[in-house]
């Protein structure tokens, strides 16, 4: 005769193993949806124009 606690432990172990191995399979399905790549030309820097005409005394903000 099989002891009930051993049977319960075995069943719980099987259920947990099943969850561990099936969870990643469900997670991978959601990753297949990819956003489309952005269009256009990426810009890292733009010519600021005439620097001598700018008021650079207080930086990007204003006088506090």
Image: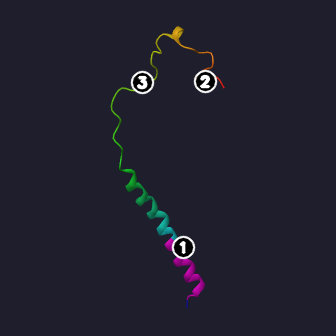
What residue is rendered at 48% in x and 67% in y?
19
Please provide the residue range marked out in magenta: 2-15
Residue at the disc numbered 3: 43
Q: Where is residue 8 in the image (x, y as percent from the top left)?
A: 56, 81
Give me the C-alpha separation between circle 2 and circle 3. 27 Å
Residue 13 within the segment the image draws in magenta: yes
Assess disc 1: are there few (<14), some (14-19) or many (≥20) residues with their C-alpha within 10 Å of its C-alpha.
few
Q: Which of 63 and 22 is in front in this view?
A: 63
Residue at the disc numbered 1: 13
* Chosen colour scheme: rainbow
Residue at the disc numbered 2: 62
User: Tag 3 or tag 1, which sits nearer the N-term?
Assistant: 1
* Left-right relation of 41 to 63: left
Q: Which of 62 and 17 is in front in this view?
A: 62
What residue is rendered at 58% in x and 82% in y?
6
Q: Position of residue 35 (x, y in %)?
A: 36, 44
User: Tag 1 or tag 2, which sits nearer the N-term?
Assistant: 1
37 to 21, vertically: above or below: above
What residue is rendered at 47% in x and 69% in y?
18
Q: Where is residue 9 in the image (x, y as percent from the top left)?
A: 57, 78
Q: Nearer the viewer, mark 2 or mark 3?
A: 2
């Amino acid at each position: 005769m099989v002891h009930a606690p051993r049977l319960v432990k075995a069943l719980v172990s099987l259920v947990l193993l099943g969850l561990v191995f099936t969870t990643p399979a469900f997670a991978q399905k959601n990753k297949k949806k990819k956003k489309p790549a952005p269009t256009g030309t990426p810009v890292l820097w733009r010519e600021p124009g005439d620097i001598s005409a700018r008021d650079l005394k207080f930086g990007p903000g204003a006088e506090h």
